[in-house]
Amino acid sequence: MSSPTLWVKSAATLTPDGFVEGATVQVAAGQVVRVWASGEAPTPKPADEILDLGPQLLLPGFVNSHTHAAMNLLRGFSDDLPLDPWLHQHVYPAEARLKPGDILWGTRAALLEMIASGITTFVDMYFALDEVAQAVRESGTRAVLGRGLITVSGRGEEALAEASDFHRRTQGSADGRITTWLAPHAPYTTTPDYLQAVGEAARALGTGVHIHLSETRREVEDCLAAYGVTPFGLMRKVGLDRQPLLAAHAVHLTADDLESFSDWRPGIAHNPISNLKMGCGMAPVARLLELAMPLGLGTDGVASANSLDFFLTMKASIWGARGATGDPCWPNAAQILHAASAGGARAVELHKKTGAIAPGLAADLIGVSLQGVGLEPVHDRISTLVYSATAAAVKTVLVDGKLLYQDGAFLTLDQEAILAHAAEIGRRLVAKN
Amino acid sequence: MSSPTLWVKSAATLTPDGFVEGATVQVAAGQVVRVWASGEAPTPKPADEILDLGPQLLLPGFVNSHTHAAMNLLRGFSDDLPLDPWLHQHVYPAEARLKPGDILWGTRAALLEMIASGITTFVDMYFALDEVAQAVRESGTRAVLGRGLITVSGRGEEALAEASDFHRRTQGSADGRITTWLAPHAPYTTTPDYLQAVGEAARALGTGVHIHLSETRREVEDCLAAYGVTPFGLMRKVGLDRQPLLAAHAVHLTADDLESFSDWRPGIAHNPISNLKMGCGMAPVARLLELAMPLGLGTDGVASANSLDFFLTMKASIWGARGATGDPCWPNAAQILHAASAGGARAVELHKKTGAIAPGLAADLIGVSLQGVGLEPVHDRISTLVYSATAAAVKTVLVDGKLLYQDGAFLTLDQEAILAHAAEIGRRLVAKN
């Protein structure tokens, strides 16, 4: 290759085969070429770049498999309420005050937080997607974007046409970092006919569908009452099992749902913090991993989860699952670290692009330090990463081999301006009339 | 008073009546004299000290109501196992390798982590308490220390005599910062006669009792089978309701247990991370708060909880409780922040000494910054503190009005030496023969 090579040295690099001690990762044209064991890497050429991370561990960047990034503007503005009044009396009225440009700033604010937490790819469902795409483009991150589609507004057809148009304009943009999917909100805010039309559109466009599914017990009961099938059953009934599907939440799964996964493997975005805090319940994480489902972790939006620290999401995945089952062994730390990167990539069919440090995949890499108070002594690196670390341990973030974050400094985003704008917009959104 | 006055200024100070904006806390002889509202504090005298925390919020220091501090040495060395093999095949063999001095270093390492997380008082149950007391003395923190007492070793009488002797030598030492309680390990590692003797000794010494109680379902079933009462019932049967009692865990409470709290109010140390991770279940937090029980939060030891970040403990308290009950409203953030300080102080009867910022109480104060990525925008300070912040937000820690920690620097402990010694000892403890 003619482009200069980047050599990333770390104390150890996590590959699909485990840690490689003292590894050097060879990166060219934004992709991992090879992971060299200690002492085996060739001598860099004069034009090459070297990034020596010293004692840091090098991990694949995290994939946040479900969020509403711009809701960063609404952090902690109405906690400790049931889902329904929270949405209708607080979230929707605040969102109704959004003006053009707000979602750009909100997404930028979320991107600061995601990058600082080691998230290199995020899967978003929101509105004003051109603003979201602009923030992704500027930030240098990778994203799967879907415009939320509902029919209860009476503008379902128009929204689907807009989303299809957005897909044609945006798919593969930002040097291939942006993927666009169609994102019908949920079975209870759309109709089966509309969902069928969305599936047809997705297949015509050659893309996937991202939807909230089986988040609450009531949603499942209502769906059974209305259509005689569970929300997952409805997906098959309307043909949404015929293109890639990402189901966010999947908290309340019936025996039939689990049985159906023997010949249908939708991606699942597990959002433990949001689900626990909102009292929705807990997805059967250990069972889904046992079934080898494509399972990623998601933060959901900051309005419900209050944080995009992906290390908190990993912890909540384990604590919540074990609280629900009483099983102290599963899921374990290694499984959840895998779900945080490779699992999320698999769930949105980006596993041939990102989610692991391996030849041919994008150099989406994070450097994490396990040195310092609250982390040492380190007897087991995976344990310390999952159970002890927080976002504060992330020191280095690269996407496509390009450095986005180093030792607290953002190299593509203006932290000061973004936090100031987000605070100002946030105040306007939550202002009582 | 003749000692110089310390004036602590903050953006807002949390008192039992809520936040006081722009407050100045007047401190003399280590105690809070008065909280002055913005613009109302008298002009400091030339000899006075001023600590201006700028945008930080000033909160009461946290009370970690149950831990085994020196187990910091064993962070993450054997996760994802059931309690019984974890204890017998991993923890006890590792602890058997402890040498004199190890517990001093392990406690120092835990103190770094606790101070950095805003914990100013901790309640410890362990061995070699003179080493633990030395670490407390050096660090400047406050502690309630109890030597673990068991009879299964055959050395129960000797241990109780040692504990009583330690109490006589140590109670009220370190300028009054150390309190010593007796700490029988649990009903299943002692006998009713022994527990009765411990109670008698505690009452003769004028102190309290700290014990693990109702941590697992099996413990409750075994206790019912052996003695016809629950572990809490056993406490009353052997007279341990006649001096202060701190029950660590209290996960599995029967209707009788809850009923008994109408005329008996033992302190409860709730350890959500350990209980969730070990699959033990979840204490009925909302119900205990509804009953106005003296409820504190604890980290348990780092060998089971992997972290002493008290902000994680607060989050797990809410996530775990709501996962167990499905109620999205309770416990709420304000209740859990209260439990983290005042509740813990009440649970060990230190509420006339610490746990709140009020006249006559010790100036155990922490400064927390809610500025920066992952915290802004701030719509509700209590929400952001509990749901969004981690230990990284703690910038300032004082105990008895003395500064222990400021902007990442420890003023009483040698971070570098402690982490190096703890790592070395840790490696020896977990080495396989």
Image (spheres, coloured by chain):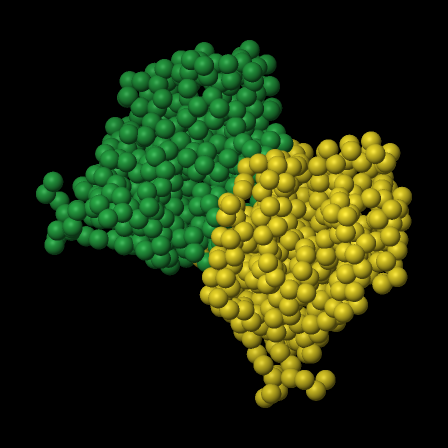
Chain colours: A green, B yellow
Residue A190 rendering spot, x and y as whole percentages: 47, 22
Question: Going 52% across and 29% down the picture, which residue do you hit?
Answer: A285
Which residue is nearer to you in this view: A76 or B282? Answer: B282
Q: Seen from this angle, which residue lies furthest bottom? A: B46
Q: Inspect this view and state whether residue A426 appears.
A: no
Residue A135 rendering spot, x and y as whole percentages: 32, 44
Question: Going 67% across and 60% down the picture, which residue do you hit?
Answer: B128
Q: How many marks?
A: 0
Q: Inspect this view and state whether residue B240 appears.
A: yes
Assign the N terminus of chain B to one quadrant of the image.
bottom right
A109, above or below A286, in the image: below
Residue A342 rendering spot, x and y as whole percentages: 37, 33
Which residue is nearer to you in this view: B43 or B47? Answer: B47
**In terms of image quadrants, where is residue A236?**
top left
- For this view, does A155 lie left or right of residue A30? right
A330, above or below B234, in the image: above
Q: Seen from this angle, which residue lies furthest front? A: B433
Residue B374 rendering spot, x and y as whole percentages: 46, 51
B414, above or below B95, in the image: below
Question: Going 20% across and 46% down the picture, which residue do you hit?
Answer: A41
Question: Going 57% across and 79% down the picture, which residue do you hit?
Answer: B50
- For this view, does A250 lie left or right of residue A421? right
**In terms of image quadrants, where is residue A296?**
top left
Which residue is nearer to you in this view: A2 or B16? Answer: A2
Which residue is nearer to you in this view: A52 or A18? Answer: A18
